[in-house]
Amino acid sequence: MAENNNGKCIGCGRCTKVCKFLNKYNINSDDYKHMPELAYSCYLCNECVRVCPVGINGRKISWEMRNNFIEGGGRLKGAGYKLLLWEKEDYLFKNYKNASYKSVLFTGCNFPAYFPKTTQIIVSRLMNEEGIGTITDCCGKPVSELGMVDRGRKIIENLEKRLHDYGVEEIITLCPNCYYYLKDRLDVMVVMIYEKLKDLKMKISPVDKDIDVFIPCPDKIDQQIFKEIEGYAVRGKMKKIGGIQCCGAGGSASFKEPLITKSLLEDFSKVHKEKIYTYCATCSGMIAKSGTETEHILCRLFDSKEKPAVGLSSLMNMAACKNKKIR
């Protein structure tokens, strides 16, 4: 649905039906805007936006309430928030050793954590076949989503300065969150890996059978990335999975709503019995936690046969990225 901030709620209940958070508190998106105490319980997943016939944007409501809380002097309490800020605000595992190229792969933070082997394959092939460099860093979205606008802006400013210092003119993102968050915030070109691969005409393994694809939150409305990915199906179709709200990682809501997150994960095994493909590394990691078989589209295209890392191994993978120089 197109956003319409002047839309008045008609009480249809569609948002409540698709959102476990709204359902738990027996409210709709319009009620929610009067309940700032629940600002950090929202998963920012865009499901309410997708189904609202009058364009009420629950995600935007949540983000504004979070911003107001922080600007009013509010402080986030809890180990989860502290750990996130410790890692992401000035990303601990950033790596610019291969950044001095006009075009660079921006791995983000989670893809190398969950898929180190596939990251290595993609990075090496882009560099050796196309002369494309690599940057490992966090885009800043996780911090900004906590309502910390000033800190999020500072992350973007620092990232932009580094890009200019290294002469970067284009970044290629692996992560849909990085793509949507950065594309209107940076003054360099931002493209998705799936679009770039078509331009480069690199040899990859096409999708040659029907597969079921879970759409990650940032791509739910426009589905711009999904449309690019569909082009890689040469014999078979990519079928969108319905009936599952989100993976449970969005908006850091799991810190406030662990039981809802548990229920969201259980939906993957309850609602869908076949292997689930996705193109978000975080979704892949969360789906794997549910015990459901999953595969990242890039693992398929680059034939890595890699399963998402779980537990402490993902943190170790991030740490390994810090000092690596790809040749």
Image (cartoon, rainbow, N blue to C red):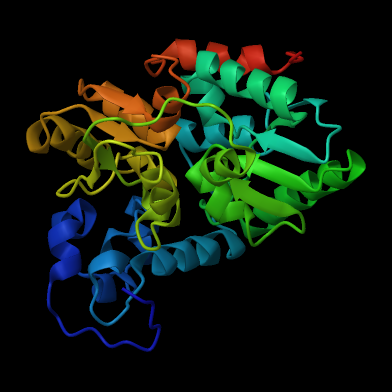
Q: Is residue 190 above or below residue 55?
A: above
Location of the N terminus by quadrant is: bottom left
Instruction: Classify residue 241 as left or right of residue 251.
Output: left
Q: Is residue 281 above or below residue 217?
A: above
Between residues 145 and 240, which one lies in front from this camera angle?
Answer: 240
Q: Residue at left 52%, top 21%?
A: 113
Q: Residue at left 84%, top 41%?
A: 162
Percent of width and height locating residue 298: 45, 29
Q: Residue at left 37%, top 26%?
A: 285
Percent of width and height locating residue 214: 28, 42
Q: Quadrant of residue 168?
A: top right
Q: Is residue 84 above or below residue 245?
A: above
Q: Quadrant of residue 199?
A: top right
Percent of width and height locating residue 202: 58, 31
Percent of width and height locating residue 164: 87, 47
Location of the C terminus by quadrant is: top right
